[in-house]
Image (cartoon, coloured by chain):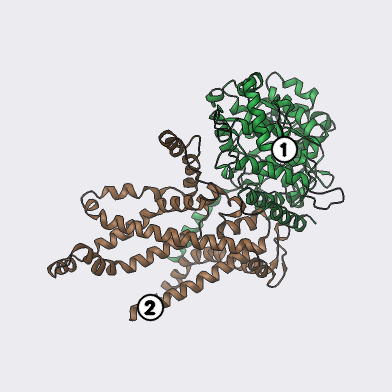
Chain colours: A brown, B green
Amino acid sequence: MVRARYFNENAVLAAPIVLFLLAFLGFPAVVDIIYSFSDVSFENLRSPRLSGLNNYAAVLADDDFWQATRFSFKFGVITALAECLIGLFLAVFLSPLFNKRPWLLAILMMPMMVAPAMVGLMYRLVLHEFIGPLPHYLYLWFGDSPSFLGPDTVFTTLLVIETLQWTPFALLLFYMAYQAIPAEVREAALVDGAKSVRMFWYIELPLMLPVLGIAFFIRFVDGFRVFDNVFVLTGSGAGGSTTSLSIYIYLAFFRSGKIGNAVAASMILFVVALILLIALGKLRRRMARA
Amino acid sequence: MKLADHLKFAAIGIAALLATTGPTQAQVTVLGWPGGPEETALRAAAEAYNAMADVADADKVELIFFGREGFFDKLQADLAAGTDAFDANLLATYSIGRYAPFMEPIDLDAGAAEVYGDSVLATMQFDGQQFGVPTDLSLHFMYYRKDLIDGLLSDDAARARYSEVSMEYLGEAMSPKSPDEWTWRDYAATALYFSKSVNPDSPTRYGTVLQMKNLLFNMMVFHSLPRSYGGNWLDESGNVVVDSDAYRTALELYKMLYDAEATPKDSLSYEYAEANAAFGAGQIAAMMQWNAAAGDLMDGEKTPAVAGKVAVVAPPSGPEGRFTHIHGLGLGLNKNAKNMDGARKFLKWMSTSDAALIYARNGGAPGLTENIVAEVAAERPDLVLLGDYASKYGFVMRGGTSAKALSVYELQAKEFTGYWAGQQSLDEALAKTKSGMEELLQ
C-alpha cells in the first residue's frame, strides 16, 4: 500500500520533467524526422509534402556539404590534438607550480569562461589591421603585418584561436588526472631507478590515457560542431572556405530556406555520430576486457 | 507531504509563472529595428501618435524590439509560425518577397507619394502591392579624403605619377579628376595611386577599402559597379543575365585592386565596421560605404584622424550611368495581427508628412522628396543628399525584391568571394552564379 503510494508520488513528481522532455526534445525530433523526408519551406511549415529521400540525395550530392564536412573534420581533429598535446605538456610541466599556487590554475581557466561568439568578436578587433593591438605592434617593430584572415591564412588563424580558448579545458582534466596518480606508484618507480622521462612515458602517461582519450573525444566533438566564433569572425569564409557543418546547416535553413536539406544534413550528422559513439563504446569495452 | 499538497504546490507555482509571463500585448504592438537611430526615431513617432487626441486607447501603440543579431532569421521563424505577438513589424526591401506570404498589403495616406516619392515607395512593394510604409532609406556614398584629393589635383608631380600608375595597371595614362566626375576607372586609378604597394610615397597605406567578406550586404555595396556597366540580375523577359560583360568587368576590377593591395590584406573578411575603422584611422583615401556611416566618419570626436577632411559624393559612373543601390526599411502588417484595424491606422499615419518629419527630426533616415526634406534641411542636411541621390541614382536589381532575393545575394557573395580569393576562375564563378540564380528565380 505504502509502496503504491510512493510509486504514485514518484510518477507525479517525475511527470513535469518527462512532459518537458517530450515537448521540447521529443516533439522537435519527430518533426525533424518528418521534415527530412519532406519538401518543406517557411511557406508550408505546417503542411509539408512528403518527398521520400530527395533531401538526403540532394545533401549527399552537394559539394558544399562535403566541403563543410571536410572542414569540420579537419578542424576538429587538429584542434583536439593541439589542445590535448599543449594541455598535457602544461599540466605536467607546470604541476609543481600549480601545487604551490593553485590560484594560477583559475587564471588559466579564464578563456573558457568567455562565450565563443564573444571570442570571435574580440579577435575581429584584435586582428584588425588598423585598430588591433597585434598588427599595431607588428607594424611598429617590423614595419609590416601579415594577413591573418586572408584566404591562405584564415584556417590557421581559426585553429590558433580555438586552441587558445580551449586548451585550458584539457589542461584542467590532465592536471587532475596527473594529481590522481597514487604517490606510491611514483615512489616505487623511483626506487626501481626510473628517471623522469621514463617515469612519464611508462608510468604516468599510461595511467592518464583514459582521461586523454575522453578529453580528445570531447574536444573533437566541440571542434567538429564549431559555429559561433568562426561565424562571427569570418562568416562562411571567402567562397565558403570556413563553412563548418553547423554553419552549412544554419545557412541552408535560414538563409536559403532549404529546410528539408538542412534537417536532412543534421540527421546524417546525427546517425554518423551515433554509429561512431557505439563503435567507440564497443572498442572501449574490448580494450577494458583485454 | 501528501500528494494533494504536491498538486497544490505545483498549482501555485504555475499560477505565479502565468502571472509573471501573462499577456503584455498592448493595443497595437509594433516590432521595430532595435538599437540604433531607427529605434529612437520610432519611439518618438509612436509617442507622438499615442498623444494624438483622436487615437483611441484601444489603438495606442506599444513598441517591442529583439536583438539585431539574426533579426531577420528570427522574424522569419516567428512569422512562419503564425505569431500574433505583434501587429506590425519591420520589413526590408530585400526580404519583402520572403515575408509577403505572412503579411497583409496596406493602404498609405493619399499624400504618401508626395512625401516619399515613387522610387522610395517602390522599395516597400512586392508584386505590385504596397506591403510597407518606408521609414529608413539606405544607399551608398563615395567617401573620400578631401585633403588628399585636393593635394593630388594641385600637384603636377603627383599628377604625372598618377598617369604612370594608371598606365601600368589600367593600360591608359589618365589624369586625376574631382570625385564628383569619377568613373569607376578614375576611382580605381586613385585607389592605386594612394596605395603604398603601388606608390611607396603615398600618404595613406591603402587607396581604398573594399568590403569583400562573404556576406550578402557586401554584394549590395558591390553591385552599383556592375549596374553602371549595364549589369542586371534578369533581363526584361526574366532570364538570368548575371554572366554579362558588365559583371565580368566589375568583378575583375575588384580583383585587380585586391591583388595590387590597393585595399587592406584582410579585405576578404571586411564588412561595414572593419571598413569604417580602416577609413577612420586615416589610412584610406576613398571608399564606397553605406550612408549610415556619414555620422561617425564626419564626427571629429569619433574619428579624429580624419576630422574635417571627409567629403561625400554619389558613387562613380560607368558607361551606362551613375547608380547607387537603394533599399528601405519600413513597417508592414502581420497577417495574424490581433488588432488589424488599429495597426492599419498607425501605418497609414506613418506615411503622412507629419510622421515622416517627426521620424526625421529624431534620428531616422527617411528618403523624402525635395519639398518635404526642405523642412528639416537645417537640422538634417544629410537627408537632402539622401533624397537627392535616391531619386537620381537609386536602383533595385530586377528580382531584387523577389522571395529568393536574399538567397541570390548569399549565392553571389559565396561565388564572387571565391573568385576574389583565387579559389575559382571568373568563368566558374559566373557559371555557378547563373545556374544557382536560375534555380532560385525561375
Which residue shows up at 58% across the image and 36% down it? B275
State the quadrant of the C terminus of chain B: bottom right
Q: Is residue B87 visible?
A: no
**Residue positioned 76% across, 21% down in the render:** B374
Please, is residue B263 above or below residue B440 in the view?
A: above
| Foreground disc of the pair 2, 1 | 2
Position of B379 compared to A133: left or right?
Answer: right
Q: What subunit carries mark 1?
A: B
The N terminus of chain B sits in image quarter:
bottom left
Residue B59: assigned label: 1
Residue depicted at 65% across the width and 30% down the height: B164
Q: Amino acid at mark 1?
A: Asp
| Residue A248 on image: x %, y % | 60, 58
Q: Position of residue B404 (x, y in %)?
A: 74, 52
- Taking depth in this image into account, of B34 and B246 the one nearest to the observer is B246
Asked which quadrant contains residue A195, the reply is bottom left
Q: Amino acid at mark 2?
A: Arg
